[in-house]
Image (tube, grey):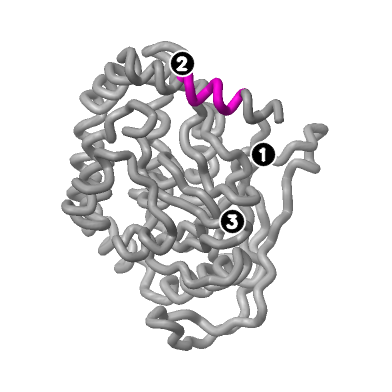
Amino acid sequence: MQRTRFASLLSRTAGRQGMIHQQGWMTPMTRPIVLQQRSLASLTNDQRPPAVRVTKHPESPEVAIMTLSQSAFSHDTARLMIEEWKAMEQDQSVRAVMLKSDLKSIFCAGIEFGEFMKGPESFGNYWKTIREVFDVIYSSRLNTAAAMHGHSLGLGCVLGMACQDRFMVGNTPKPATIGLNEVAVGVPVPHWLVELFAHITSRRHAERLLPLGRILSVQEAVQTGLVDKADFSSQQEMEEFVVRYLVGRNKAPRIAQSETMRVIRLNFLNFFRASEEEDVATIVKYIQEEEAQSVLKAQIARLAEKSKR
């Protein structure tokens, strides 16, 4: 597994920026933004990009950009994401992070199906790591925003919900979708995810959508409150907006802002952490059920067949 070291990246000086009001969002006015897309793969003999990499925005280096380069999360990818996130937390020059992907039409397709099939002990350890991924984002001192270009299913939706704000562009190169589709693959939605989804949208939306494994269009996601803004014409436009938005949030006093966000999220975070043992035992139990195994095996076979075409 190729590793990057975000803490070693050099910061650049941010330019002076004013504020404008755009479509109900406060955004700072900047020069045209070109997002830094340096791949650290060139530092090794392995030409594949790392599954997770972190850069700083070239004009606003207080904004870090975490980029996902794999459509599905393996255990190694989850561990790498935790490592990189913790490195960002330690860099006091960073105040915000935009979470995005560089995949053509997918933000994150969820858990790698093979992880479900490795046996209860292996999956239990994997699920604990996934919970830690959520924890480091949800409890972060940083201002966080997910810029979701393309499909955001299962874990992809969870990563978005862990952030403070969610933005999507859904029509390029093809219409995108978002949602918790666990039921559709034979696994019940964990208690903490039900509560978080209901908190972000509403309990009625949770009752109507989650038991069906319903996947939403971008427009439906905005209507339910799952996504905050989606009227972007391209991925570039969305990412430029998100960087400006984060720079605007960063103008609030650092300590007062982070402590207020910590208090806002404290009750849910305490519930989430206290329920770990029960949560892991429950999901391990249900993925071993014949129904879930049958659905998962069918999904794996379908993907294998698709890869041959």
x then y, percent, for residue 263: 22, 57
Q: How crowded is mark 2: few (under 14 residues within 10 Å), some or many (20 or more)?
A: some
The label shown at residue 174 is 3
x then y, percent, for residue 274: 20, 33
Q: Earlier in the sequence, mark 2 or mark 1?
A: 1
Q: What residue sits 66% from the left and 79% below the top? A: 32
Q: How far apart are the alpha carbons under marks 2 and 1?
A: 24 Å
Q: Residues within 10 Å of mark 3 (few under 14, many from 20)?
A: few
Residue that mark 1 sits on: 50
The label shown at residue 307 is none
Quadrant (top left, top right, bottom left, bottom right) of the N terminus: top right
Q: Which of marks 2 and 3 is nearer the N terminus?
A: 2
- Mark 2 residue element: loop
Query: Which stretch is magenta?
Result: 297-304
- The amino acid marked with disc number 3 is Lys
Q: How far apart are the alpha carbons under marks 3 and 1?
A: 25 Å
- The amino acid marked with disc number 1 is Pro
Q: How crowded is mark 1: few (under 14 residues within 10 Å), some or many (20 or more)?
A: many
Position above or below: 5 against 26: above
Q: Earlier in the sequence, mark 3 or mark 1?
A: 1
x then y, percent, for residue 192: 24, 39
Residue 301 falls within the magenta-colored stretch: yes
Seen from the viewer's position, the closer of residues 238 and 259 is 238
- Mark 3 residue element: loop
Position above or below: 110 against 144: above
Q: What residue sits 41% from the left and 60% below the top? A: 166
Can residue 168 be seen here? The reply is yes
Can residue 93 be seen here? The reply is no
Majority SS type along the magenta span = helix
x then y, percent, for residue 186: 34, 26
